[in-house]
Amino acid sequence: MTKIDKKIVGFGIANNAEKSSPSAEQSADNSSENSSNNTAALEQTIEHMHENVGRPEMLVGATYKIKTPLSDHALYITINDIVLNPDTDHEQRRPFEIFINSKNLEHYQWVVALTRVISAVFRKGGDVTFLVEELKAVFDPQGGYFKSGGRFMPSLVAEIGDAIELHMKTIGLIQTEELSDIQKQILADKLQKYNEQNAIEPKADSGYPPSAQLCIKCHTKAVIVMDGCKTCLSCGDSKCS
Ligand SMILES: [Zn+2]
């Protein structure tokens, strides 16, 4: 039991490690200086991502299958997450490591290098969403390809970035800009009108007219010209001349 013979000027929540450490008394003496607030003490107990956060025995994650026209074999991207501050208001799920597997060994060397660098960036902490834009901006000089749905993929690296983006959206690290139902309806009406005007049978895989151009905003072959306006039927981006 401790007798308090001074005025209490501040308090904080001590954890067991601090209690048993020899510096505990010393810090108690300095408590008048540190009395500024207990939000600081609270802040200390919130775990943020940094390189010394140990890997728990078990992590949960997701695996994304990627099939490109560049290879006969599919690529499997696994991203495992760590949950920081579980069961608190500050609970946060963050990517912790990435693995890429494929039967195709052609790209093995740089794919392994890439996954190690990305995993290291994940563990460093801070804002890691920039990785998505960096990877998606990589263009293959031999030319990209279109995925089903008419979306253009400029390279295999960009495709990996796309999978990371999807994962970050799923765990809430990146907010999705969803079109409203009204916007979707307007675009669907436009598509129908365009198809009627041009007597087009809708293309099976994407639903966008075959004559549609590539949208520079969402990289989907979904831009139609109607009534003097260019409209992307995928993201709604529109320009009138
Ligand atoms: Zn678009």
Image: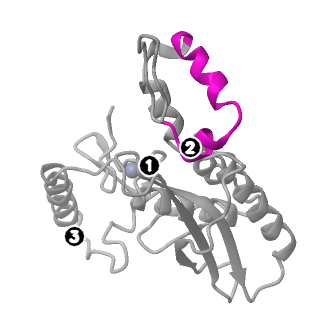
Q: Which residue is depicted at the point 45% across and 75% down?
A: 148
C-alpha distance separating marks 3 and 2: 57 Å
Label 1 Cα crowd, 10 Å radius (few <14 / some 14-19 / many 20+): few
| Magenta-drawn segment | 14-33
**Mark 3 crowdedness (10 Å alpha carbons): few <14, some 14-19, many ≥20:** few
In the figure, 34 relative to 1: above or below? Answer: above
Label number found at residue 174:
1
Secondary structure, mark 3, is loop
Rendered position, 94 above or below 90: below
Q: Residue 58: which numbered mark, if any?
A: none
For the question of whether residue 126 can be seen, the reply is: no
Crowding around mark 2 (Cα neighbors within 10 Å: few <14, some 14 to 19, many 20+) is some
Nearest the eye: 235 or 49: 49
Where does label 2 land, which residue? Answer: 48
Q: Amino acid at mark 1?
A: Ile
CA–CA distance in space, label 1 to label 3? 40 Å
